Image: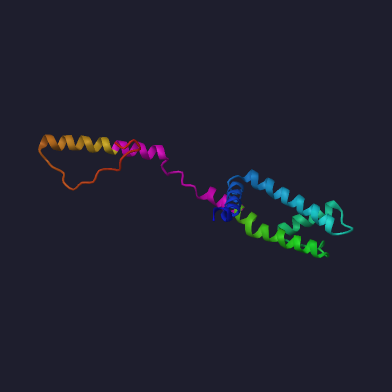
Amino acid sequence: MDALLWVPRMLYRAVVWLANSPRTLLIAYSILIVVCGTLYNRFEAGTSFGDSIWWAVVTASTVGYGDISPQSWQARVLAGILISVMVLLVIPLITAHFSSKLIVNNDAFRHEEQEELKENLRVARALLEQMAARQGITSEGSADPPAGPSGR
């Protein structure tokens, strides 16, 4: 069963890798444009390489001016794949990346800060219990803060 899930896991990891860096996403987009432009140039007779790259950019951006359109079935399949990859993968990855950058909570505590706060709470609780013991006050039913990473 693990063998069947290997390919989807690798694809998922590749997508995560692409999504986490604008540089890799831009490089992947550029490679996609060049590869699709080159394939279009091979499939469509009488097109220049520049026109093929222009077709790939226009098709990938889903603008589709119509000045260059595929005539062969291979180029039409390529156009369908290029549009699908852009609309279903690349554009959502770009949007998700920039959205996540806009939503970052700068006031959130880092892990180290949270651990320091928990340790300070433990020390304050111990001091309060010492003070309560001196005054003869019992604190039944109170909850202890969560244990730290060292299990104190």
Q: Residue at x 79, y 62 (%)?
A: 74
Which quadrant is home to the C terminus? top left
Q: Position of residue 5 (x, y in %)?
A: 56, 55
Q: Position of residue 103 (x, y in %)?
A: 50, 50
Q: Extreme left residue here?
A: 136
Q: Residue at x 21, y 34 (%)?
A: 127
Which of the two residues, 89 or 1, is positioned nearer the viewer here?
Answer: 1
Is residue 132 rendered to the left or right of residue 74?
A: left
Which of the two residues, 80 or 98, is positioned nearer the viewer here?
Answer: 80
Q: Residue at x 88, y 59 (%)?
A: 45
**Is residue 140 shown to the viewer in this render?**
yes
Please tell me whether residue 20 is drawn above or below residue 58 in the rendered image.
above
**Is residue 62 shown to the viewer in this render?**
no
Which quadrant is home to the N terminus? bottom right
Q: Position of residue 107 (x, y in %)?
A: 43, 44
Please tell me whether residue 69 is drawn above or below residue 118 in the rendered image.
below
Please tell me whether residue 101 is drawn above or below residue 150 in the rendered image.
below
Look at the magenta stretch and give its main secondary structure: helix
Is residue 124 rendered to the left or right of residue 96?
A: left
Q: Quarter-wise, where is residue 128 in the image?
A: top left
Q: Residue at x 46, y 47 (%)?
A: 105
Q: Position of residue 131 (x, y in %)?
A: 16, 35
Count of numbered circles on the image: 0
Which of the two residues, 37 or 106, is positioned nearer the viewer here?
Answer: 37
Q: Extreme right residue here?
A: 46
Q: Which residues are magenta?
A: 94-120
Residue 72 lies within the magenta run? no
